[in-house]
């Protein structure tokens, strides 16, 4: 019997990467196989992102490219994820190439919909759920030394620019023990680092347990060497959580702390629920308790009605905080959001572009300075795999900075010179080893094994 083969292409955030692993598990249980190219697939699924206009455009581009394959051999095409949720019937209309459309809370319906699609019937499942957490499904992960666990889904914050509360629905958390058991199973299979995921991860709650309890419970698992989390909201940072990050050696000293804007008025328009002063006080509190912390952020430039002076406040805050790195986005109006309904998207595109460029330039200088300050230091790196060159290892520091260093026994490496005979490299993916930083760029540290 022919096993239908599926090719899944994933766009967007880590939650989408994780959802692709869930979808693989759901399809595998129903007898589907997988392939790594649309050319050899019976079914192509695009797991989509709706967060900004360019994410949308990318998906349309890929859909267009699938048209000849569909015409030639009746490929079944599915659109999953946030864009499916957001556009609903639009994508099924008329001569649409799409056969199935499945939102983030409806992946269990996918196998049935694909079977119907193979028989020529289009279908969609885009209802949002208050309960679905897929807690009973073990994601079909690509085996490795790092893994993600989605601990909560959805978001209730309704930042006015953001489509997530509409595409992923209400906040709901998995139970703590189920997550701990999943992390224990991962540790038993050789995984060294778990990243706890959620749209608003620090609002996690299971009865009397909060996010700090969860973080510590996972960090205490034998075999798990590092725990990370993303993305937290600055509004949920009690001392207890800070203490968990600062005090537990296995919780990575890295906090991604989305700023979005540095002007009080814009923050209020965005419904971020903190002021500029409160955000800066939080940064101080974090750095005071944990001086080694690496801070990173997200910033949006050119939100509705943002003036030059208000943008200057964002620029000033980014310069003052000196994040290790930052994702800087041009504001992109999203259908149905509060901002799209209530405010005019009135900052001209050229000005948005210029503001983004100025922030990027500022941040690149800061990132380079911070990385260069690490030259000469010894830092611990978790080796994840080969670097771009196969004679190099690639890993990350505790602060999440990408670090590459030569494999032992490779021509030209320091360690090769030290070794009398080039022994087989004792380092492998999953090794946690000290390395000596010798050089740095904006994004990468270069090192030698210590
Ligand atoms: N336009 C631009 N950036 C956005 N983000 C979310 N919504 C938008 C939007 N409409 C950014 C925020 C968020 C990150 C994941 O994406 O900075 O933190
Ligand atoms: Fe979007 Fe705000 Fe929720 Fe983050 S916290 S997912 S930006 S609504």
Image: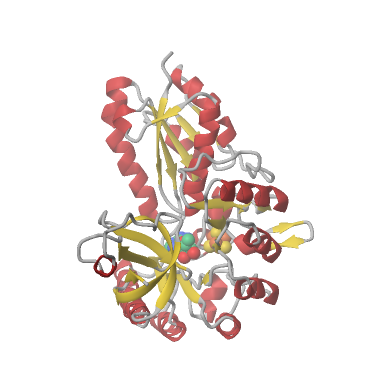
Instruction: Please determine whether, in this image, residue 60 is positioned above or below residue 32.
Output: below
Please state if 422 lies on the left or on the right of 4 as rendered: left
Q: Say whether residue 411 is left or right of residue 156.
A: left
Q: Position of residue 115 (x, y in %)?
A: 50, 21
Residue 277 position, x and y percent, is 57, 85
Give the mark count.
0
Q: Position of residue 15 (x, y in %)?
A: 51, 51
Q: Is residue 425 left or right of residue 123?
A: left
Q: Residue at x 26, y 60 (%)?
A: 421
Front residue of this view, candidates 423 and 375: 423
- Outermost residue on the right side: it is 208
Say which quadrant the C terminus sits in: bottom left
Residue farthest to the left, as pictured: 411
Structure colour scheme? secondary structure
Front residue (pair 269, 127) = 127
Specify the farthest residue to the front.
Answer: 420
Please report the residue visible at 25 percent of the width from the left and 56 percent of the height from the top.
389
- Is residue 301 visible to the viewer in this orientation of the structure? no
Q: Quadrant of the N terminus?
A: top left
Quarter where residue 375 is shown: bottom left
Question: Which residue is nearer to you in this view: 360 or 353?
Answer: 360
Residue 333 in view of the camera: yes
What is the x, y in percent for residue 211? 67, 63
Image: 72 above or below 336: above
């Amino acid at each position: 019997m022919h096993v239908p083969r599926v090719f899944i292409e994933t766009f967007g955030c880590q939650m989408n990467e994780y959802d692709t692993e869930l979808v693989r598990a759901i399809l595998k249980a129903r007898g589907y196989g997988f392939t790594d190219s649309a050319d050899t697939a019976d079914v192509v699924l695009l797991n989509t992102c709706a967060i900004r206009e360019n994410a949308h455009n990318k998906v349309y581009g890929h859909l267009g490219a699938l048209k000849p394959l569909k015409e030639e051999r009746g490929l079944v095409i599915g659109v999953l994820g946030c864009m499916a949720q957001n556009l609903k019937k639009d994508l099924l209309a008329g001569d649409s190439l799409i056969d199935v459309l499945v939102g983030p809370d409806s992946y269990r319906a996918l196998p049935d919909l694909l079977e119907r699609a193979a028989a020529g019937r289009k279908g969609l499942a885009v209802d949002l759920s208050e309960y679905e957490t897929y807690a009973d499904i073990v994601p079909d992960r690509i085996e490795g030394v790092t893994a993600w666990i989605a601990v909560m889904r959805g978001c209730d914050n309704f930042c006015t620019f953001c489509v997530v509360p509409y595409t992923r629905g209400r906040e709901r958390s998995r139970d703590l023990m189920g997550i701990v058991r999943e992390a224990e199973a991962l540790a038993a299979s050789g995984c060294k680092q778990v990243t706890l995921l959620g749209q608003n991860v620090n609002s996690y709650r299971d009865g009397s347990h909060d996010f700090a309890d969860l973080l510590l419970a996972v960090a205490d698992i034998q075999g798990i060497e590092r725990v990370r989390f993303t993305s937290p909201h600055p509004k949920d940072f009690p001392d207890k959580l800070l203490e968990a990050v600062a005090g537990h050696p296995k919780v990575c000293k890295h906090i991604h702390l989305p700023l979005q804007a540095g002007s009080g008025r814009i923050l209020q328009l965005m419904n971020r629920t903190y002021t500029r002063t409160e955000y800066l006080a939080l940064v101080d509190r974090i750095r005071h308790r944990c001086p080694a912390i690496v801070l990173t952020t997200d910033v949006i430039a050119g939100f509705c009605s943002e003036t030059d002076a208000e943008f200057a406040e964002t620029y000033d805050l980014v310069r003052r905080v000196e994040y290790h790195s930052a994702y800087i986005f041009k504001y992109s109006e999203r259908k149905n959001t509060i901002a799209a309904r209530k405010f005019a998207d009135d900052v001209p595109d050229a000005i948005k572009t210029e503001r983004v460029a100025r922030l990027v330039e500022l941040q690149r200088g800061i990132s380079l300075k911070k990385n260069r300050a690490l030259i000469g230091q010894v830092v611990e790196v978790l080796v994840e795999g080969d670097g771009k060159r196969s004679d190099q290892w690639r890993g990350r520091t505790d602060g999440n900075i990408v670090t590459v260093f030569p494999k032992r026994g490779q021509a030209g490496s320091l360690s090769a010179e030290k070794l009398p005979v080039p022994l087989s490299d004792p380092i492998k993916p999953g090794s946690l080893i000290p390395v000596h930083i010798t050089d740095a760029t904006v994004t990468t540290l270069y090192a030698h094994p210590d």
